[in-house]
């Protein structure tokens, strides 16, 4: 399934849930926040929230900042 | 008697807030945070980068004890973007604190007062503890207090410039007028400037570049920790009045000339 991930084309091969996308990215899920088409998806919904073709997903993490 | 810094029902012993940007490594950042004895630390949000997973500093920060995170809204160009960044930051940190910063011009990074005010109104309604980064403007500071900000953070000088307390007189007016903590954010280069801010009556200072860009960040963090403490103590002790002419501190009796 083709989606836009952090502004770039991404081919997702999992089951289409947010959780499956994060598994695919191999990041620590407790350290990430997710937006789907501009709306925040709370962590408790990651298993059930499905992504559709051409959706825009943003995966954000904390970095150093003042 | 304990001297604590309070925001709503959350209180801190340390009056030094530390930013986590610009450190050469996470190891140096962590040792600097420890040396600073800070309890409130700012972080920024960024898109996850598959190629640079070491960017994530949340893990190392979570291992520190007694640290509360304050996500910032850096990168937001307007109120709408800042609100979204704040909500994402809260989702991730579970912290009510947000450092609200909206500075659309990358040349000077000066805060946009209008967008900042609009975002603050909304975030305060949504139960955030809003600490806005603002120009040293007493009128704006008062307006932000009125709509429920937890503190105001006027700049001493542009972010990362190290120009010191160039807005000292305006910050003094803000302190005099405010019923919420005033925290100098941006511009400070040396511990003496942090001490001066505290002597003036600031409730805290937020330091990032001055520590991260020092030759030895860990030592500089310790220096700031001590200066903030000294400045606060001096403020509590009350500085002596200043006068235009000398007032002798030794007796000026004329017995030496009485044997001529």
Image (cartoon, coloured by chain):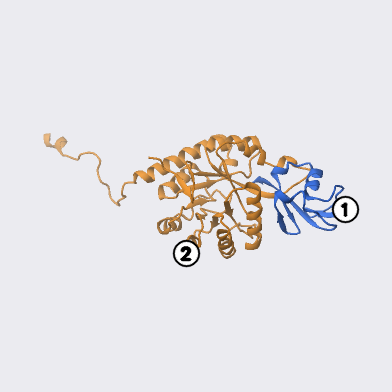
Res. B216 visible in picture: no
Crowd tier of the residue under label 2, counting other residues whose Cα lies within 10 Å: few below 14, some 14–19, many 20 or above = few
Q: Which of the pair A49/A23 is nearer the observer? A: A49
Indicate which disc residue B15 carries: none
Q: Which residue is mark 1?
A: A1
Res. B201 visible in picture: yes
Tag 2 secondary structure: helix
Residue A33 in picture, x, y percent from top left: 70, 49
Residue B165 in picture, x, y percent from top left: 48, 51
Q: Which of the pair B213/B1 is nearer the observer? A: B1
Residue lying at 72% horizontally and 58% vertically, measured from the top left: A39
In the rendered image, the vertical position of residue B115 relative to residue B194, given as above or below? below
Tag 1 secondary structure: loop
Q: What shade does chain A have?
A: blue
Q: Which of the pair B109/A2 is nearer the observer? A: A2
Q: Quadrant of the C terminus of chain B?
A: top left
- Tell me which chain the residue with mark 1 is part of: A
Q: Residue furthest front?
A: A48
Q: How many numbered marks are there?
A: 2
Q: Which residue is mark 2?
A: B139
Residue B240 in picture, x, y percent from top left: 31, 46
Q: Quadrant of the N terminus of chain B?
A: top left
In the rendered image, the vertical position of residue B170 relative to residue B62, given as above or below? below
Residue lying at 65% horizontally and 37% vertically, measured from the top left: B60
Residue B202 in picture, x, y percent from top left: 44, 50
Q: Which chain is orange?
A: B
Q: Is residue A62 left or right of residue B188?
A: right
Identify the image quadrant of residue B33: top right
Q: Nearer the viewer, mark 1 or mark 2?
A: 1
Q: CA distance from mark 1 to mark 2?
A: 53 Å
- Tell me which chain the residue with mark 2 is part of: B
């Amino acid at each position: 399934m083709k989606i836009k991930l952090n502004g770039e084309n991404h081919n997702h091969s999992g089951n289409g849930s947010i959780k499956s996308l994060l598994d695919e990215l191999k990041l620590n899920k407790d350290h990430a926040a997710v937006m789907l088409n501009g709306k925040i998806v709370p962590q408790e919904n990651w298993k059930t929230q499905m992504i559709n073709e051409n959706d825009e997903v943003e995966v954000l993490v904390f970095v150093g900042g003042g | 008697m304990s001297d604590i810094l309070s925001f709503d029902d959350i209180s801190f012993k340390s009056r030094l807030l530390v930013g986590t940007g610009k450190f050469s490594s996470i190891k140096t950042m962590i040792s600097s945070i420890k040396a600073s004895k800070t309890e409130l630390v700012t972080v920024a949000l960024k898109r996850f980068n598959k190629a640079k997973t070491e960017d994530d500093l949340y893990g190392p920060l979570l291992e520190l004890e007694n640290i509360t995170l304050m996500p910032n809204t850096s990168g937001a160009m307007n109120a709408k973007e800042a609100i979204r960044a704040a909500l994402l930051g809260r989702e991730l940190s579970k912290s009510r604190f947000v450092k609200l910063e909206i500075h659309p011009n990358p040349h000077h990074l000066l805060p946009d007062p209008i967008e900042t005010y609009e975002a603050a109104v909304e975030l305060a309604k949504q139960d955030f503890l809003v600490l806005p980064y603002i120009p040293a403007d007493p009128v704006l500071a008062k307006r932000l207090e009125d709509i429920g900000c937890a503190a105001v953070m006027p700049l001493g000088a542009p972010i990362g410039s190290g120009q010191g307390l160039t807005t000292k007189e305006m910050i003094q007016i803000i302190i005099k007028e405010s019923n919420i903590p005033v925290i100098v954010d941006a511009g400070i280069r040396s511990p003496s400037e942090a001490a001066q801010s505290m002597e003036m009556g600031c409730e805290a200072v937020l330091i990032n570049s001055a520590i991260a860009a020092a030759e030895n960040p860990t030592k500089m963090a310790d220096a700031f920790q001590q200066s903030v403490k000294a400045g606060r103590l001096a403020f509590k002790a009350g500085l002596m009045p200043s006068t235009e002419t000398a007032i002798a501190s030794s007796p000026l009796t004329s017995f030496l000339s009485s044997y001529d």
